[in-house]
Image (spheres, grey):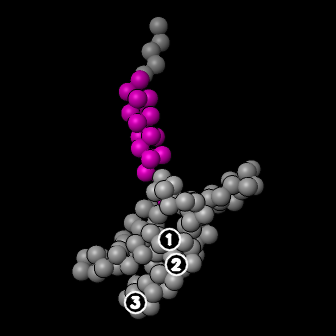
């Protein structure tokens, strides 16, 4: 969402933003040919599954060397969003799995919608 980080930081100045890695991966693979998809995603996994930010950036450089000729926008997209994609490297490995995706939050919201959608207000 455009402006999301700015809006949050305006109200909560010490907030650290972590964009969803899963959404970034989906966006990255949107226009990749099927024959390249498996190896490209494996190379991206080296980026987001790295032990620390420095290793992740090195993996992103390696990814770019291999894939930029065919898919130049992918590594550029990761670099452009890096500030909000790399926040979780500040946390221990055990916590990262919980915060690198918004799937848990989306699942919770989906459950709330199920409950609230089926309820109707009746007037007497």
The vertical placement of 69 against 120, above or below, is: below
Sequence-wise first label, 3 or 2: 2
Label 3 sits on a secondary structure element that is helix
Label ID, residue 51: 1
Q: Quadrant of residue 82?
A: bottom right
Q: Which residue is mark 2?
A: 55
Disc 3/disc 2 C-alpha distance (Å): 17 Å
Label 1 sits on a secondary structure element that is loop
Label 2 sits on a secondary structure element that is helix
Q: Answer with left or right where residue 17 lies relative to residue 11.
A: left
Q: For the magenta stretch, what is the residue range?
A: 99-119
Q: Which secondary structure dominates the residues rendered in magenta? A: helix
Q: Tell us which disc is closer to us: 3 or 2.
A: 2
Magenta run includes residue 116: yes
Q: Quadrant of residue 111?
A: top left
Disc 3/disc 1 C-alpha distance (Å): 21 Å
The vertical placement of 52 against 65, above or below, is: above
């Amino acid at each position: 969402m455009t402006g999301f980080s700015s809006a949050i930081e305006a109200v909560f100045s010490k907030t650290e933003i972590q964009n969803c890695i899963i959404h970034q991966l989906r966006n990255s693979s949107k226009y990749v040919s099927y024959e390249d998809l498996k190896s490209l995603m494996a190379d991206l996994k080296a980026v987001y599954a790295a032990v620390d930010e420095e290793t992740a950036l090195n993996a992103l450089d390696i990814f770019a060397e291999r894939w930029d000729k065919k898919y130049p926008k992918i590594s550029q997209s990761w670099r452009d969003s890096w500030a909000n994609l790399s926040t979780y490297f500040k946390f221990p490995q055990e916590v990262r799995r919980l915060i690198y995706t918004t799937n848990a939050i989306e699942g919770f919201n989906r459950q709330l919608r199920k409950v609230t959608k089926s309820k109707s207000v009746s007037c007497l």
